[in-house]
Amino acid sequence: MASPRDAAPPWTGPYRSYDLVKELAICIAVVAALATLLTILFSSPDEKPSTIASWARTQPNDFLTTATAELDGSSDTAGYGPPYNHAATGQVIGPIHLQSWLGVSHPVNTAVDYVLAPLATIPNDPALRAALARYVAAPAAQRSAWTDAYAKSIGRAGGSSGAGPVAPMMTSLLALAQSGGLDGALLTSRHFYQTDYTKPLLFLADGSLLSDRAQAQHLLGDQWGMMNETGSYPGQVWLWLYTFWYQIEPFKSSDNADALVWALMMLLSVAFVCVPFIPGVRSIPRWIPLHRLIWRAHYRAHAGRAS
């Protein structure tokens, strides 16, 4: 309880009316005007998104190489495993098969989804229809021979000898992608809102476009890259502990690095939460009183009042 001598003396000066609502309205109007002006002058700091159309226009050979890998099933997505297909078991932690237990929840057939189905939507092209029919009717060995021959011819002069129907198929697919049609074809679904970008993102990730952008933004795994905003290099300090584990063994060379790092971070998080309950660890502040150095002004004032 405060003593009478600590009480403030009564105010004897003048009084003036004050409209708090008016002041708040003026502040909101000024901030809104500044925000609008700065938005017009400086626009958004975010970079333009990567699209399949821009990829096909700027890097046609990489697009064709990736599309050919999707067609013959040799791309990363085709061999990823759950939740996209059954081609692999996915990440595991000892006996715990995280991906395979959850199953294929978002099926992706790379040959159909990225090549055959989009090409089937192109109207009024009898030659393309004939090429598609020939490819679909051929045995697996013949398809593989065609895709191999076409993959070797990408970027070379002199045509694509031995590629069969794959050559006209890829020519039409490149034209469709450059027009922006493939972006739309990969977003079609039975839902009213087209918000599932899984398929186009997987397709882009199988090429070199996203990895090149990630390298430029210092986002690759060996660059310790994690950030919440584009251009915010080197990223958030609190995320470095997560990316640190990817730089050392056994995580660096493990096929299960994602699952192992996640499990380790969960274990460390639980240990951090349990610090107040771990004997010895909870006594460290008493043994090494750094907090007294940081809050020295508080402790000095408290000691003065106690005396």
Image (cartoon, rainbow, N blue to C red):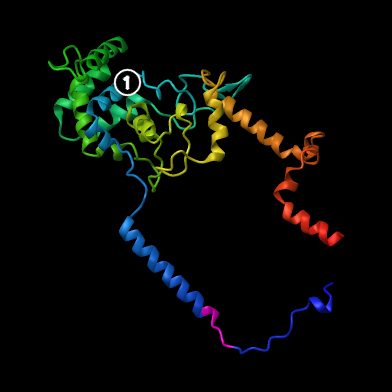
287 up-or-down from 97: above or below = below
Specify start and end residues of the magenta stretch as a single range.
16-21
Image quadrant of residue 270? top right
User: Which quadrant, please, contains the C terminus?
Assistant: bottom right
Q: Residue furthest left?
A: 158
Asked whether the viewer can see residue 120, the reply is: no
Residue 139 in the image: x percent, y percent?
Answer: 29, 12
Foreground residue, 101 or 257? 257
Q: Looking at numbered disc 1 in the image, what kind of residue is underneath it? A: Ala
| Dominant secondary structure of the residues highlighted in magenta in the image | loop
Q: Secondary structure at mark 1?
A: helix
User: Which quadrant, please, contains the N terminus?
Assistant: bottom right
Question: Is 57 within the magenta?
Answer: no
Left/right of residue 46 with respect to residue 152 in the rendered view: right
Left/right of residue 39 with respect to residue 176 in the rendered view: right
Residue 246 in the image: x percent, y percent?
Answer: 53, 25
For the point 18% across and 35% down, the residue is: 123
For the point 41% across and 67% down, the residue is: 32
Residue 256 in the image: x percent, y percent?
Answer: 54, 21
